Amino acid sequence: MFDLPEEIETPVRKIEAGERISDAEALALVDAPLSLLGLLATRAKERKSGRYVYYNRNFHIEPTNVCVFNCRFCSYRRPADSPEAWDYGEEEILAQVEAHRHSGATEIHIVGGVHPRNDLHYYVGLIRKIKAIMPEASVKAFTAIELAYMIRKAGLAPAEGLCLLRDAGMEAIPGGGAEIFAESVRQRICPEKGTAEEWLAMHREAHRAGIPTNATILYGHIESWEDRIDHLSRLRSLQDETGGFNAFIPLKYRSRNNAMSEAGEVSVVEDMRMTALSRLYLDNVPHIKAYWPMFGKTTAQMALAFGADDMDGTIDDSTKIYSMAGAEDRSPSMTTEEMERTIRSAGYLPVERDTFYNPVKK
Ligand code: V47
């Protein structure tokens, strides 16, 4: 079909026939021509979501940048006594929600440092109060690492804690904290953080409790392509078991102002390979997200030609994680008009979605 070496031709044939590729085949594809990866990933995307590309209206709440862990890639964490630390109390957080009450946002994304003081019961109360202000918005909150800490601190089992949060109004869980599952790399970039098994177990429990979640990878630092495929493989297996992942988000390591800066950043060509490989390998995950506050707007738009079908949301200048790590947008914000223009000019049809990928009626 294509004039390609045997080791690339075989996975290409499988993908075109809608068959699953193995880890070794995914590794062989890493060296395929970029244009071919774009073509294959686009066809795979279009089999799942046609000509549509999704976005939502959201804002983030980052309650604190104080964290019990000290991950080497993080540009955001500060010690509690630093003048650059923030630690919003409940009233300040609720004021942020109040400020968005009439914004039309359908999702509130809450993620921050793992705070030493607050346990599950504080967050259960907080979510209830947030939902009382914006009942129409879905709360997508807390990485598996934050959840493990707050639930353990309350002396509960993961399933019990998740059910309490769900019943308070936590309707989805974001994909953060996954980083790289391979133990040797995880030990070097975030030795204090929960393990891969802990992350996967929390998502498994969430799926069992009927809470959909996302998954991420932090790539482009000291890990190898083998480590990336190993990460995708563990996610694909869990998805086979539960079907609970909505979206996968490849997060490009941004190198400014953190303890791993010397690792530098990978090229945009590599970002496109990573996006395409994610789409091609994760045949059971419906959505691949091009997260523009981390990629930058131009690269995120380009990722739509490499299998991504979701651009996350309007954000409204409410996240600092990436701008503090050197991403292009110092105050990340996109109007719905700009979002729709970005998607249309890449040749796709924009769809405003809710957290669960239902189209929002306007
Ligand atoms: O786990 C931290 C990453 C994640 C850096 O689920 C960095 O919809 C790059 O997971 N360079 C948290 N990345 C954010 C996250 C997320 C974001 C948007 C949407 C969703 C979703 C989830 O941010 C962390 C870590 O992997 N991160 N520092 C850095 N220097």
Image (cartoon, rainbow, N blue to C red):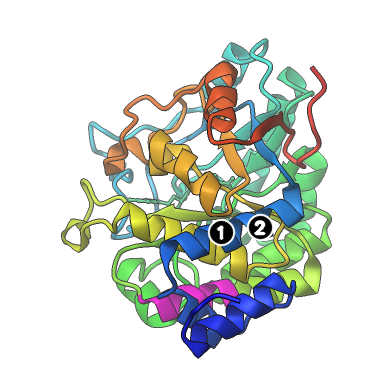
Q: Position of residue 35 (x, y in %)?
A: 46, 60
Q: Amino acid at mark 2?
A: Arg
Residue at image point 77% right, 42% down:
356
Residue 66: image quadrant is top left
Residue denoted by label 1: 39
Mark 1: is the Cβ under 8 angstroms from ligand 1? Answer: no
Residue at image point 70% right, 61% down:
285
Residue 31 vs 350, above or below: the answer is below
Q: Position of residue 69 (x, y in %)?
A: 38, 58
What's the magenta region? 224-233
Q: Amino acid at mark 1?
A: Leu
Characterize the magenta stretch by its predominant secondary structure: helix
Disc 2 crowd rating (10 Å Cα; few below 14, some 14-19, many 20+) is some
Instruction: Name the one closer to the observer, 6 or 90.
Output: 6
Q: Is residue 70 left or right of residue 317?
A: left
Residue 309 vs 39, above or below: the answer is above
Q: Specify the quadrant that holds the N terminus.
A: bottom right
Residue 178, visible in the rendered structure: no
Residue denoted by label 2: 43
Secondary element type, mark 1: helix
Residue 348, visible in the rendered structure: yes
Residue 316 vs 118, above or below: the answer is above
Secondary element type, mark 2: helix
